[in-house]
Amino acid sequence: MTKADILVFVQSDLDMKVIDSARTAQLNHLIDSAVSYIEREGVAFTVTDGTYNFTAEEADVVEMYACYLFRKRKTDEGMPRMLRWSLNNLLFSQKARVSDAT
């Protein structure tokens, strides 16, 4: 999956039927921010020729994080447990695969 695929999921999750170019730019920025924040946590995404190639699980976590960032700007609530749990599971599964390979 690509960032364009995730954008469609974010729009759907946020119940945005029709969006203009400014909103699209905002959502793309939130997706990029979510990817950066997740990578800072230690998750490694696959990048081929400068393009991210997300697995279904990775795309789901990026989508949840981007939606959280969008909603957080109005509510200032903390990170939902489901998102924290998903981030931890993604990170731990990647680390387990690395240690199994060595």
Image (cartoon, grey):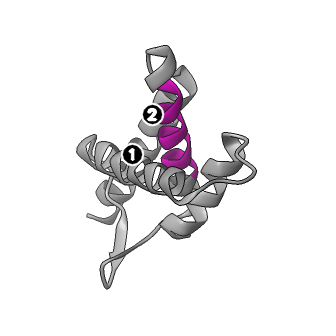
Q: Return the residue at label 2.
A: 69
> Does the stretch in magenta take in 58?
no
Camera-side residue of 55 and 68: 68
Q: Badge 2, how many Cα within 10 Å: few under 14, some, many 20+?
A: some
Q: Return the residue at label 1.
A: 34
For this view, does 4 lie left or right of residue 13? left
Label located before the other in sequence (1 or 2)? 1
For this view, does 79 lie left or right of residue 8? left
Residue 40 vertical placement versus 83 (above, below): below
Q: Position of residue 56 (x, y in %)?
A: 60, 60
Camera-side mark, 1 or 2? 2
CA–CA distance in space, label 1 to label 2: 8 Å
Q: Secondary structure at mark 1?
A: helix
Camera-side residue of 23 and 65: 23
For this view, does 65 lie left or right of residue 56? left
Q: Position of residue 51 (x, y in %)?
A: 37, 76
Residue shown at 52%/50% (left/top)?
23
Q: Quadrant of residue 13?
A: top right
Amino acid found under the numbered disc labelled 1: Ala
Residue shown at 56%/70% (left/top)?
1
> Does the stretch in magenta take in 64?
yes
Q: Secondary structure at mark 2?
A: helix
Start and end of the magenta stretch? Answer: 60-72
Q: Dominant secondary structure of the magenta stretch?
A: helix
Residue shown at 34%/47% (left/top)?
33
Image quadrant for the C terminus? bottom left
Q: Position of residue 45 (x, y in %)?
A: 36, 62
Q: Position of residue 66 (x, y in %)?
A: 48, 42
- Residue 71 is marked as none
Q: Badge 1, how many Cα within 10 Å: few under 14, some, many 20+?
A: many
Residue shown at 55%/40% (left/top)?
64
Amino acid found under the numbered disc labelled 2: Leu
